[in-house]
């Protein structure tokens, strides 16, 4: 190519770019080219989105397990998301760091429990009723929104206040009718005996009254056949609620199974000396085979000083163990130290 020809082409290209920037219609080589400028950005498109409002919301993609607590009047209830079921395990639900609470709440409600959505209620491993979401509840300590609604159950479960729940269409397929085991004389006779054995084994101070220390006693039918299992909670210096406890308090929680020769013996225990561990008061919520494999899982709610959290207990190859514990979203307060007699009287400790 000649130098003059190459130079002419460079000048022509420069003129084309100038013409494109300055006008709408350009003629080149006998062809008419129409230049259409891009449309102006719409509302909110020019600015970068707030972190977490579009991506990375951490919303559940699988089935969600719910805890339903019915009010004393028997109709109004609170729907609390517990965890996302992922295969044989559970995943803690929480608002990711950097995500605005409003954005997370709106997207979570729209995806999981919008107003008018229906949920199936379970108690003691059987389907017993339904709940329809009607309003918004307060968020959990992990920033997960809750909902309120109207609950209805079969007549046999009318006195029950706590349930496990799944959104309709995502609930496990279970057979059988609601028939709760009774807290019979055998369970009542062994409950405090088992608790006393655990208290002495762990060096805790015996309560003034075993009936007074008993906060919860349930008969479970997590493993079908034979005698029902027993779950019990004993507390000293504490209650089954969020809030402070006495520094010298303790909690004893256990699940016991029945053996013909020995009676009820503990198969799973949680013993806490608050002076060393801080507050933690567990109580069984309910049991349900929510993953469809093996025996039923047992959901436990633990009440701490600043929040409550959940645990799952399951029987694996004949051994009961904790298979999941929800992450805590508030830093637990440091355990209070018991004050000895010498410190109370102002004498220096020896």
Image (spheres, rainbow, N blue to C red):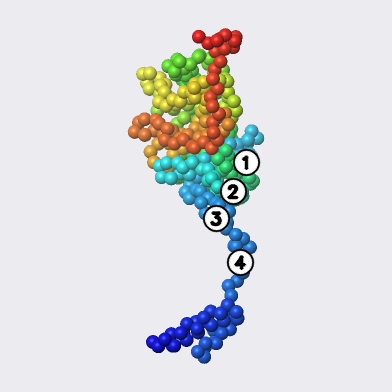
Tell me if residue 116 comes above or below residue 337 in the rendering. below
Picture disc at residue 138: 1
**Foreground disc of the pair 2, 1:** 2
Query: How many residues crowd around disc 2 within 10 Å: few (fewer than 14), some, or many (20 or more)?
Result: some
Tell me if residue 37 comes above or below residue 259 in the rendering. below
Say what secondary structure mark 1 lies in: loop
Farthest residue in the left direction?
Answer: 317
Query: How many residues crowd around disc 3 within 10 Å: few (fewer than 14), some, or many (20 or more)?
Result: few
Task: State the residue position of label 4.
Answer: 41
Picture disc at residue 100: 2
* Residue closer to the observer: 297 or 271: 271
Q: Quadrant of residue 136?
A: top right
Picture disc at residue 31: none
Residue shown at 59% from the left, 10% from the top: 346
Q: Are marks 4 and 3 in contact (CB under 8 Å)?
A: no
Task: State the residue position of label 3.
Answer: 54
């Amino acid at each position: 190519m000649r130098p003059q020809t190459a130079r002419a082409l460079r000048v022509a290209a420069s003129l084309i770019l100038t013409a494109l920037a300055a006008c709408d219609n350009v003629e080149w080589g006998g062809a008419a080219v129409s230049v259409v400028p891009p449309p102006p950005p719409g509302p909110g498109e020019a600015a970068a989105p707030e972190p977490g409002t579009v991506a990375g919301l951490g919303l559940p993609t699988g089935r969600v397990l719910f805890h339903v607590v019915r009010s004393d009047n028997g109709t109004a209830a609170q729907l609390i998301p517990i965890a996302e079921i992922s295969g044989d395990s559970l995943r803690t639900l929480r608002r990711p760091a950097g995500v605005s609470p409003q954005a997370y709440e709106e997207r979570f409600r729209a995806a999981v429990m919008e107003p008018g959505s229906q949920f199936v209620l379970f108690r003691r491993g059987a389907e017993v009723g339904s709940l329809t979401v009607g309003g918004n509840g307060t968020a959990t300590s992990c920033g997960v929104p809750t909902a309120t609604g109207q609950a209805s159950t079969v007549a046999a479960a009318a006195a029950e206040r706590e349930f496990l729940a799944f959104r309709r269409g995502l609930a496990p397929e279970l057979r059988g009718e609601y028939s709760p085991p009774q807290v019979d004389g055998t369970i009542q006779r062994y409950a405090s005996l088992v608790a006393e054995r655990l208290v002495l084994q762990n060096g805790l101070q015996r309560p003034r009254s075993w009936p007074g220390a008993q906060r919860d006693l349930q008969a479970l039918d997590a493993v079908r056949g034979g005698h029902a299992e027993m779950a019990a909670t004993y507390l000293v210096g504490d209650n089954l609620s969020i809030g402070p406890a006495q520094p010298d308090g303790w909690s004893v929680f256990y699940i016991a199974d029945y053996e013909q020769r020995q009676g009820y013996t503990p198969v799973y225990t949680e013993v806490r000396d608050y002076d060393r561990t801080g507050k933690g008061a567990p109580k069984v919520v309910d049991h349900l085979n929510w993953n469809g494999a093996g025996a039923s899982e047992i959901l436990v709610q633990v009440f701490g000083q600043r929040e409550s959290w959940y645990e799952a207990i399951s029987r694996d190859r004949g051994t009961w163990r904790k298979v999941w514990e929800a992450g805590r979203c508030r830093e637990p307060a440091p355990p209070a130290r018991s004050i000895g007699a010498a410190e109370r009287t102002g004498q220096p400790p020896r």
